[in-house]
Image: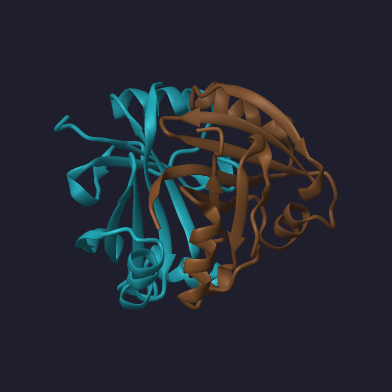
Chain colours: A cyan, B brown
Amino acid sequence: MKISHIEHIGIAVQNLAEAIPFYEDVLGLKCYAIEEVKDQKVKTAFFKVGQTKIELLESTDPEGPIGKFITNRGEGVHHLAFAVENLEECLQETEAKGIRLIDRQPRKGAEGLHIAFLHPKSTLGVLTEFCEDKNK
Amino acid sequence: MKISHIEHIGIAVQNLAEAIPFYEDVLGLKCYAIEEVKDQKVKTAFFKVGQTKIELLESTDPEGPIGKFITNRGEGVHHLAFAVENLEECLQETEAKGIRLIDRQPRKGAEGLHIAFLHPKSTLGVLTEFCEDKNK
């Protein structure tokens, strides 16, 4: 497996309208896109910091994954996403090494990326995502 | 404030000896340094992923910050560190914008960086660190 960089860091927030000003006015980053990912029951706001994006996640449904995360743990870092080449191969290789996968096949994520999650029980508590940008 | 990139992601783990094989053998990253930061009561292991480091943190004392974090929340992402220029100025600017600081003055962190933390109550649940590399 070849990981080139951290593609994004997903951060669960109660409310994008309250969170965006911290990242823009305090940290001086710029929100360049807001996107709803219906499948994941979230609205996301994106910021670029060097090679990596910060993806703020507001739940659109208390029963969705971010809604449950915030109920259980409060706001905070939700997942780390690594940029990989050949996602299908990475998933096979990862599973063969005994790691539990959430997604055995890639699916479509925000910004048109192909994504898959590994299970945090297998990854030392960090919900870990692989992303492939097929347009590159 | 000018943030150039994400300097590192701090991840609390129970045990470096168990965690390093996941990052090396599964993700294919290389642990390039292990360092004890006595002040923080941690042993750290470093990996480079593009511009960003992953810093695994094992507590050397259950009463230290990482020991308490793991007792309360389990293993997982502990903090995000942004690379800044002129850390003193960043801290003044951040405090002037109403953000609560943990460190009002820079102190020495791992790898000889100058660091300071913002309080997660002011940063939407994400323990946020600023780092300056004065050797650059």
Left or right side of A104 for B42: right
At x 25%, y 43%, the residue is: A107
Left or right side of A18 for B101: right
Give whichever of A121, A78 is nearer the camera. A78
Residue B123 seen by the camera: no
Give whichever of B97, B23 is nearer the camera. B97
Q: Quadrant of residue B68?
A: bottom right
On the image, the x and y values in percent for residue A54 come to: 36, 53
Give whichever of B127, A79 is nearer the camera. B127
Left or right side of B81 for A31: left
Q: Quadrant of residue A36?
A: bottom left
On the image, the x and y values in percent for residue B136 come to: 50, 33
At x 40%, y 69%, the residue is: A22
For the view shown, which residue lies furthest in the left direction? A135
At x 84%, y 58%, the residue is: B63
Give whichever of A38, B5 is nearer the camera. B5
Q: How many marks?
A: 0
In the picture, the quarter occupied by the C terminus of chain A is top left
In the picture, the quarter occupied by the N terminus of chain A is top left
- As drawn, B40 above or below B118: above
- As drawn, B128 above or below B43: below
At x 57%, y 60%, the residue is: B127
Left or right side of B88 for A128: left
